[in-house]
């Protein structure tokens, strides 16, 4: 479980460009997610603006935590355990990852280079590999 310093910088810099449009980014994310897998929509019973803020807060914490992955692991494991209560399944990680990549591509435009994309893919794999074992479904 390792990222290069360059990958961390690329992810953190690109996320800082999306943060100013956090509300719109969350909207793009959930529209993409439900477009990719409409069966996920019933899992989200709360106000989607509130949900979007939670998403962006969690992403910020994860992105900020990339400099110390060992400290980030317990937080991701706890997040996964909480998601068991929401009906999350291991199969949901792929559409979530794809929706996140689409959101970044949309939000960053030309700034979403192949190198930035690959850095995010590496981060997504680390997050998924950490969270999936905690998911029951």
Image (spheres, rainbow, N blue to C red):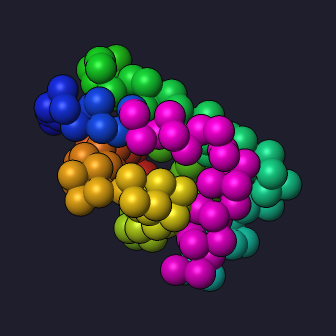
* Image quadrant where one finds the C terminus: bottom left
**Residue at horizontal 57%, vertical 72%?**
32
**Residue at horizontal 65%, vertical 71%?**
31
Q: How many marks?
A: 0
Q: Is residue 92 visible?
A: no
* Image quadrant where one finds the N terminus: top left
The one nearer the camera, 73 or 117, is: 117
Q: Is residue 5 visible?
A: yes
64 above or below 102?
Answer: above
112 above or below 134?
Answer: below
In the rendered image, residue 58, in percent from the top left (x then y), is placed at: 56, 36
Asked whether, in this view, residue 123 is left or right of residue 77, the answer is left
Asked whether, in this view, residue 93 is left or right of residue 121, the answer is right
55 above or below 108?
Answer: above
**Residue at horizontal 33%, vertical 27%?**
66
Q: Residue furthest front?
A: 110
The one nearer the camera, 17 or 89, is: 17
Q: Residue furthest right?
A: 47
Main secondary structure type of the part rendered in magenta: helix
Asked whether, in this view, residue 42 is left or right of residue 17, the answer is right
Whether 35 is among the magenta residues is yes
The one nearer the camera, 59 or 71, is: 59
Asked whether, in this view, residue 24 is left or right of residue 102, the answer is right
In the rendered image, residue 17, in percent from the top left (x then y), is placed at: 51, 40
In the rendered image, residue 84, in percent from the top left (x then y), is placed at: 55, 51
Which residues make up the magenta segment? 13-36
In the rendered image, residue 80, in percent from the top left (x then y), is placed at: 48, 43
**Residue at horizontal 72%, vertical 72%?**
42
Whether 29 is among the magenta residues is yes
């Amino acid at each position: 479980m390792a990222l290069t310093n360059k990958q961390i910088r690329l992810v953190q810099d690109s996320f800082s460009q999306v943060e100013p449009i956090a509300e719109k980014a969350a909207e793009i994310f959930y529209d993409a997610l439900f477009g990719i897998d409409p069966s996920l929509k019933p899992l989200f019973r709360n106000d989607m603006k509130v949900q979007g803020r939670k998403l962006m807060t969690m992403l910020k914490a994860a992105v900020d935590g990339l400099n110390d992955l060992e400290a980030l692991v317990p937080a991701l494991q706890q997040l996964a355990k909480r998601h068991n209560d929401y009906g999350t399944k291991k199969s949901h990680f792929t559409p979530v990852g794809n929706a996140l990549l689409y959101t970044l591509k949309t939000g960053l435009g030309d700034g979403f280079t192949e190198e930035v994309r690959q850095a995010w893919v590496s981060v997504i794999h680390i997050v998924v590999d950490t969270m999936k074992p905690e998911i029951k479904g």
